[in-house]
Structures are given as C-alpha cells and as structure tokens.
Image (spheres, grey):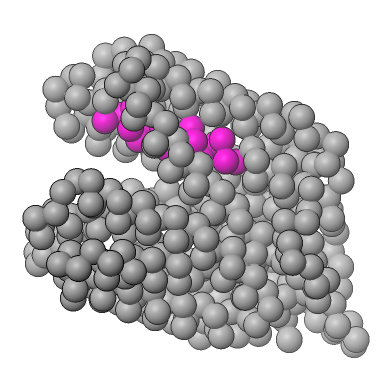
Amino acid sequence: MAAGYADILRAPHAARLLTGTLVGRLPNATAPIAIVLLVRAAGGSYSLAGGLAAVYGIANAVGQPLLGRAVDLYGQPRVQLPAAVVSALGAVLLVTAGIGSLPVAYAAVVVAGLATPPLEGGLRALWPRVLGAEERVHRAYAMDAVAQEVMFTVGPLLVTLLVSLWSPGAALLVLNAVGVLGALSVVLSEPSRAWRSAPREAHWLGALRSPGLLALLGAFLFVGIALGSITVAGVAYADDHGREAVYTWLMAALGLGALVGGSVYGAREWTGAPERRLRVIVALLALGYLPLILTPGVLAMTAFAAVAGVFLAPAIACAFLVVDRHAPRGTVTEAFSWLVTTFGVGASLGTAVAGPVVELAGTSASFAVAGAGGTVALLVLLATQRVLSAPVRPSNAVPLIENDRSGAAEPGLGSGHQA
C-alpha cells in the first residue's frame, strides 16, 4: 500500500499540493480548540467559548461552497490566497480585541470562518490533471482521506504544544500565519495557476442542481452526525471510567482505524460503479458503530473504536469519486466544498444531539446515536439508488479538455482543465 502512495507522491507537483493543502487547512482543523483555549485563558465562560467556536463552524459551513463556486468561476489563485489572508486577519482581530467586546469577537470569528479558503475542494479538483489515470486519482482520494485523519489528530496536539510554549493567542496567530503560507504554496504551483474549471451552465443552484449530488450530501449529513456524536459519547465514557486519558485513547484508536482502513482501501485498484461500492462501505461503517453501544471495559472499548474507524476513510474517499461523477460541469470545486460543509454540519448536529442523549439516557444511548446515523446514511443511499446510478459523467471516461481545440492537452477525468 505504501508503494501505491509513493507512486502518487512522485508525480510532479503532487507532494507539494498535498502538503500545502494540509498546512493551509491547519487553521480550520485547530480553530475550535484554539478559540476555546483563548476564551478560557481570558476568563470567559465555557458557554462563550462554545458559542464562538460554534459561530466559527457555521460561518465556515456557509463560506466553503460560496468560495468553491468563486474558485470555479475565477480560478484558484484569485480566490484561495486572498481568502486565506482575510481569514487570518479575522484571527488577528480576535486575538487583538479579545472578549472585551463580544460583538467584535463574534464578528472576528465570522470573518475567520467565512473566509476559510476551500483548499480541500481545490485539491480534489486538481488531482485529475496532476495524476491523469483514474485509478491513480482514486488512490489519491484515499490518501487525501488518510492525510485528513492524521491532520485532525496532530492539529490539536500542535495547539497544545504552542499554548504551552507561548499562549493561546500566539498559537492562533502562528497557526493562521502557517496556514497562509500553505495556501501560498498551493496557488503558486503550476497546476493551481493553470487550472480552469470547465465551462458551466449559468444556474443559481450551481452544483446543487445535481440529484445525485443531493442524494450523496443527504447520506453524508448522517455520516457526519454519527462521527460527531462519538466525540461527545467518548467524553461521557471517559467520565464514567474516571480517567480523562481514556478519551484520548478512544479518539486515537478511531483515527488509527481510519488510517489503516484508508491505507488498505487506497492500495487496491477497484472496479465497478463507486456508487454501489459506497453503499457496501457505509453499511460496514454503520455495522462498525454498533458494538460501541455495549460500552465494555477500556481495552475492549478501545478495540471497538479502532474497528469503528476502519471504514470512515474509505467511505470519504469513495464519496470523493462519486462527487466527481455527479458534479455538473464547471462546478467541481463547489461540489467538493458542499460535501465538506455537509459533513461538518452533520458532525455539529451529532455533537448537539449526543449531549442531551447522555444526560437523559446515559453513555450507551449516546453511542447508539452513532449507529443510528450510520444506518440512516445507508437508508438514504438505498432509497436514492436510481438517481445515484445516473452520473453526470462516468469515472472511467477520459474526455478531452473542454476548449482544447488542438486536442494537444493530456486527457484526464474531466473535472476541470488547464489553460
């Protein structure tokens, strides 16, 4: 499996684009915990800290598809870098103003969240042109999903380290400065500068006019709910066992499972329609969440958490391919950004639902929310088989680049084209 990923990273520009995107997304991955630590260090309440973090998340959810559409219309450099700078300035405003003026604090997190550049969707729009062959793009999607798991594991640890060395405010500033450098590295690369979206039909719904994409988003809203609920249920389980470290073990096991699952999935060349494969993977994902309801001892629970994580990265990687097949022409970055947004909103809803469930029915019931979320996601995919079976463009199609009259450009998957 390592050899397959090494082959991807040896492709021209691939390692730079992946690294730059991950670094550029560090502010987004670490913002919630950094905001909470900043507010608490300034003497603010947990309610205020949670409120600011929630507003940041909502603003980010709104901004991603809007900026994704702008990228499709105007290109990556003209949108990604200015957005990264504006988002960083929002963080600077929050650190500078503190919580002395709540309107300013809330305005700062709105700016920071709303302007977060859609680097994730942008990278997935670039892979077809950088890698060419469809099986290599599919493997890159799996590698991307694995890299996300690593980033969301390392990010909070990095925040903790920077806070211990300096302060929460300094941590927020450093991470946003690094994020701008990551975005700069991406937009200065040749693929990013040359990429242009395919011509698009003018439509106010943009990517959302695709029934297949809407079906996928509906399913992944519930996948997000499942994952978000586990974060709260894990805290409740750790409280029941009297050790905060237990929560760390559970989350690390979940991430390790996703890392292993994504690595194995990406190492294999898959055949057949990805929509059908996605149904199987989501079924296994839902099944993997069910043993958590038993809430056994710590060792067994940690093992169950690892199993529960195995099919998460493959589900995300397969969803990337389905998005690419169902996104209307000229909307690929926006479509990927909608998936990011929907998954994030689902995770927030799962967190919000699991809290009251813990208080009303206990820890076991809160883990049942994850199982229910995975099950409903599967039911959505089963109920929408007809629209998902009719993609806008098949994944094995290798059309010539639109507007390439000479036919000299290298064919790819049709997600976009280079100028």
Residue at point 30% right, 56% down? 52
Is residue 94 among what the camera can see? yes
Q: Relative to residue 259, is residue 148 depicted above or below?
A: below
Q: In this view, does 36 lie to the left or right of 186?
A: left
Camera-nearest residue between 357 and 172: 357
**Image quadrant assignment for residue 228:** top left
Residue at point 59% right, 63% down? 65
Camera-nearest residue between 214 and 254: 214
Residue 6 place in picture, x, y as percent: 52, 59
Which residues fall within the magenta stretch?
220-235
Whether the magenta-drawn stretch holds residue 114 is answered as: no
Quadrant in the picture for the C terminus:
bottom right
Q: Relative to residue 77, is residue 23 depicted above or below?
A: above
Q: Relative to residue 280, is residue 76 depicted above or below?
A: below
Residue at point 63% right, 81% down? 75
Is residue 20 among what the camera can see? no
Residue at point 49% right, 36% down? 225
**Image quadrant assignment for residue 70:** bottom right
Camera-nearest residue between 405 and 48: 48
Q: In this view, does 38 lie to the left or right of 63?
A: left
Q: In this view, does 255 lie to the left or right of 52?
A: right
Residue 282 place in picture, x, y as percent: 62, 31
Residue 252 place in picture, x, y as percent: 32, 38
Main SS type for the magenta part?
Answer: helix
Q: Relative to residue 303, is residue 34 depicted above or below?
A: below
Number of marks drawn: 0
Residue 245 place in picture, x, y as percent: 18, 33
